[in-house]
Amino acid sequence: MPSWGRHDGLCDRARRAERDEGRRRLEGLRRQRRDGAGVLDYSGVPVRVVRPEYLVALYLEPQARTAKRRERAAALCEDPAFDHQRLQEIMMRFHLTW
């Protein structure tokens, strides 16, 4: 077997491992988003609402990051009630960047 054949197999395994790690991180982020949702009253019906910090984090997830999503994230961050400290904690926990 040529030496490059073994390296291709290693690269494929590394890519799969990286993809699987990304999926696990995303699942953790989704689970935390669900658990951290707030509850609002909508005409007498309690409704779970995702906090904007988690929406921004989901917009910045590498598999889903587009220019449009970065714009939406920036718009959410401009809200005076937005918790920038919470977003920083989420981004650090899930290794996200702008």
Image (cartoon, rainbow, N blue to C red):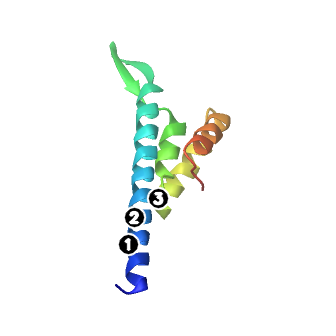
- For the residue pair 87 and 30, the one nearer the viewer reads as 30
Which residue is labeled 1 in the image? 9
| Residue that carries the numbered disc 3 in the rendered image | 65
Query: Is residue 64 visible to the viewer in this orientation of the structure?
Result: no
Residue 15 horizontal/vertical position (percent): 42, 65
Q: Residue furthest right?
A: 85
Q: Nearer the viewer, residue 80 or 62?
A: 62
Residue receiving disc 2: 13
Please state which amino acid type lies under the numbered disc 2.
Answer: Arg
Which residue occupies the foreground of this view, 44 or 85? 85
Measure the C-alpha gap from mark 3 to mark 1.
28 Å
Residue 48, placed above or below residue 30: above
Q: Secondary structure at mark 1?
A: helix
Q: Relative to 69, does residue 89 appear above or below in the rendering?
A: above
Tag 1: Cα neighbours inside 10 Å, few (<14), some, or many (≥20)? few
Q: Amino acid at mark 3?
A: Arg
